[in-house]
Image: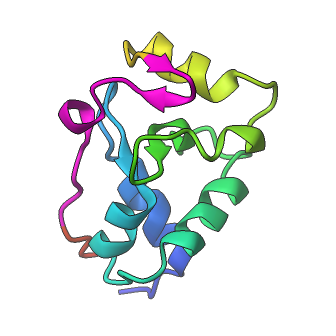
Amino acid sequence: MKEQNFFERVYAVVRQIPHGRVTTYGAIARAIGAARSARMVGYAMNASHDDDTVPAHRVVNRNGLLTGKFHFDGTNLMQQLLESEGVEVVDNKVVNFKELLWEPTVYEGE
């Protein structure tokens, strides 16, 4: 079994986020066994924009805020992508965040 790097483990979890749902940087960090690495998950999301298999727009902060929106092309692209999946966003925050929050299970690797 090949050892995956941190970003690859993050991307594997992010690819599992269901359409129309969101998760948080911290939830992803916990799922890959790096609970104190939410900021590194953010770096991974920022580095993922060339990979259209990683739905980075579904990752928000612990309060449901679109804190990563400035890393997307265009001012409102993150919001537009979420809204195209039926996720309502008002004032850069996911409406009904707790109901739409997807908690990943522990990532086991490949």
Does residue 17 belong to the magenta stretch? no
Task: State whether residue 6 is above or below residue 50.
Answer: below
- Image quadrant holding the C terminus, namely bottom left
Task: State whether residue 76 is above or below residue 72.
Answer: above
Instruction: Name which quarter of the figure residue 19 lies in.
Output: top left
Residue at (61% x, 56% y) in the render: 45
Whether residue 57 is visible, yes or no, is yes
Relative image position of residue 109 (x, y in whole percent): 31, 75
Whether residue 110 is visible, yes or no, is no
The answer to which of 13 and 65 lies nearer the viewer is: 65
Magenta segment: 89-105
Does residue 94 belong to the magenta stretch? yes
Q: Is residue 96 toward the left or the right of residue 81 in the image?
A: left
- Image quadrant holding the N terminus, namely bottom left
Relative image position of residue 52 (x, y in whole percent): 62, 38
Q: Is residue 51 toward the left or the right of residue 100 in the image?
A: right
Instruction: Name which quarter of the figure residue 72 lies in.
Output: top right
The answer to which of 5 and 47 lies nearer the viewer is: 47
Residue at (59% x, 62% y) in the render: 42
Residue most toward the front? 91
Residue at (47% x, 51% y) in the render: 61
The answer to which of 18 and 39 lies nearer the viewer is: 39
Q: Is residue 72 toward the left or the right of residue 39 in the image?
A: right
Relative image position of residue 88 (x, y in whole percent): 41, 16
Relative image position of residue 65 (x, y in whole percent): 50, 40
Residue most toward the right? 74
Task: State whether residue 102 is above or below residue 95.
Answer: below
Instruction: Name which quarter of the figure residue 47 lies in.
Output: bottom right
Count of numbered badges drawn on the protein: 0
Residue at (30% x, 34% y) in the render: 97
